[in-house]
Image (cartoon, grey):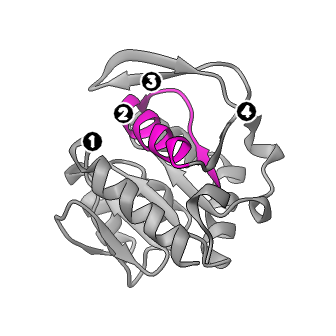
Amino acid sequence: MTAIADAHILIIATNRFEEAELFDPRDTLLGAGARVTLASIDTDEILATVHDEPGRTITPDLTLADVRPDEYDALLIPGGVGNPDTLRTEAKAIEIVRAFDAAGKPVAAICHGPWMLAEAGIVSGRTVSPWPSIRTDLKHAGATIVDEEVAVDGNLITSRKPADIPAFTQALIAAIEAR
């Protein structure tokens, strides 16, 4: 079992991530003593959105190309429309998602973040709870869709929206500590 204070969590994001879906879980994880690393396409500042309006910025710690999945205990993918829509066109981002899933490590995606799970081909036969506008995409990828604040299916943790962040983050912490 891994104590959350001993865990190293990777967040992957790029411009137009939903502000609360990155900062809130990150702050909770850091507050619990976990190490959290943010990776993006490059190390230039990335811009959040707050319901499609510009939000805060954050500077990634490293690039996707520099990520070594074996160095992390879990993966977190925030939503926002633009973030996963851009990341799902990045081969390295898809490779990272697949590596975490293949290793059985927790993969947590919220709101539009589960688009990455569909793109990586890891939702077939699994239950997910995504934002309403991407439910059809996930269903076509073979997922079973539920409308719940958090769905946990094996190592996959998904939630619908910012209001679900507390349950989403607690489910991620529980999955890390159960490993």
Q: Earlier in the sequence, mark 4 or mark 2?
A: 2
Q: CA distance from mark 4 to mark 2?
A: 19 Å
Q: Earlier in the sequence, mark 2 or mark 3?
A: 2
Q: Which mark is residue 48?
A: 3
The residue depicted at 38 percent of the width and 65 percent of the height is 171
SS type, badge 1: helix
Image height of 23 relative to 146, above or below: above
Q: Earlier in the sequence, mark 1 or mark 3?
A: 3
Q: Quadrant of residue 14?
A: top right
Image height of 15 relative to 5, above or below: above
SS type, badge 4: loop
Q: Is residue 137 magenta?
A: no
Q: Which quadrant does the C terminus fall into?
A: bottom right
**Residue identified by numbered label 4:** 61
SS type, badge 2: helix
Q: Amino acid at mark 4?
A: Asp
Q: Earlier in the sequence, mark 4 or mark 3?
A: 3
User: Does residue 3 appear left or right of residue 156 in this picture?
Assistant: right
**Image x and y of residue 51, in percent:** 26, 26
Q: Amino acid at mark 1?
A: Pro
Q: Which mark is residue 20?
A: 2
SS type, badge 3: strand
**Image x and y of residue 62, in percent:** 76, 36
Q: Earlier in the sequence, mark 1 or mark 2?
A: 2
